[in-house]
Image (cartoon, rainbow, N blue to C red):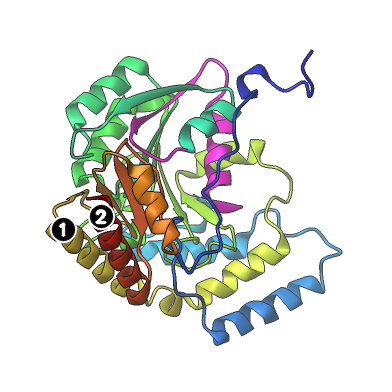
Amino acid sequence: MTWPPLREELRGLEPYGAPQLDVPVQLNTNENPYGPSAACADDIAASVRAAALGLNRYPDREHVELRTALAAYLSRDTPHGIAPEQVWAANGSNEVMLQLLQAFGGPGRSALSFAPTYSMYPEYARDTATRWVQGSRAEDFSLDLEAAAALVRAERPSVVLLPSPNNPTGTALPPDAVGALCEAVGEQGLLVVDEAYGEFRRAGVPSALELLPDHRNLVVTRTMSKAFAAAGLRLGYLAADPAILDAIRVVRLPYHLSAVTQATALAALRHAPELLGKVDELRAERDACVAWLRDQGMRVADSDANFVLFGTFEDRHAVWQGLLDQGVLIREVGPDGWLRVSIGTATEMQAFKDALTQVRKDQS
């Protein structure tokens, strides 16, 4: 027997993770380049110290104060409002997704999405022994709604995972897609709309939160990692029918959110206007990047996120390596021939443009 006695379907697999390299310009993991202010950091430090004085006790298992604050924040994106009883949080949106698959997936059940999409989705399915079903997107990375609904009805998945904006393409779901797919999923499953990059969507693109009162099988997930500039916090959350939260409580680990995490997240939410203050600037920088890349004759996917997918290259790895050699790290991800660049500061984006111009010149 081969040691260690690993599950056969996991043998030989590599762990997920983007390269973490110490280079001057890091534009590969869709982080917010603007960190919290000194005032915000001081509030977090004071909050963590207060929590530390009670670390001999378990944290609030229901994280009620945090859920109340998150509900108030989410209510800004829907005229219907969000109640604390509809909100659940966990250690990053990764744990939120895993809990959903633990509760609603599993042996004899399936999860479905449409490629290209977030590469962790099939791993959540694998880790929960859920059968993975993968449809495909159109040439422009949009979703053919009729074909998507037909596949959902044919496969009858327990969970459908749809990011909006999509990662790695940046494509947002059209307004009518969520409702139509909720209808296609029906009572046998959930439609999970992953809005990890939702705060970066363009004006006029609604949040799926608006449809929660109409579809009890709809789940909308968010994260504090991106727009909130809190990737190091590891705080993801969802809004859904309270019955879905009751199901998650069955599979969650006891006291899964530490007192320190809850205190830090609450402090960050108190500084939401500041932390979200650079979103408009990053949107403008994104749109400028899209325009520049197109001016250079490249294909670029329309983006509602804080990253841009561009191409196509006969040897994308050579382009990626050429940029890295000049101190600019982007992501080699998505369909063959495409690359993804996260949106950074104006200075970082100029460094990316200069490096890409030089790489293309050297390879011509």
The picture places residue 324, in percent across and down from the top left corner, at 44, 57
Q: Residue 214's spot in the image, x, y percent? A: 30, 42
- Asked if the magenta segment contains residue 361, the reply would be no
Q: Given the current orientation, which residue lies at the most extreme right position?
A: 56
| Residue in the picture at 53% in, 51% down | 19
* Residue at screen point 53% across, 32% down: 123
2 or 1: mark nearer the eye: 2
**As drawn, 283 above or below 246:** below
User: Disc number at residue 296?
Assistant: 1
Q: Residues within 10 Å of mark 1 (few under 14, many from 20)?
A: few
- Secondary structure type for disc 1: loop
Q: Is residue 116 magenta?
A: yes
Q: Is residue 118 above or below residue 125?
A: below
Q: Is residue 117 above or below residue 302?
A: above
> Where in the figure is residue 228, as x and y percent of width and height?
46, 67
Q: Which stretch is magenta? A: 90-119
* Residue 281 left/right relative to 323: left
Compute the Cα span from label 2 to label 1. Answer: 10 Å
The quarter of the picture where residue 358 lies is bottom left
The residue carrying pointer 2 sits among few (fewer than 14), some (14 to 19) or many (20 or more) residues within 10 Å by Cα, namely few
Residue at the spot of label 2: 360
Q: Is residue 146 left or right of residue 363?
A: left
Looking at the rendered structure, the kind of residue marked 2 is Arg
Q: Amino acid at mark 1?
A: Gln
Give the secondary structure at mark 2: helix
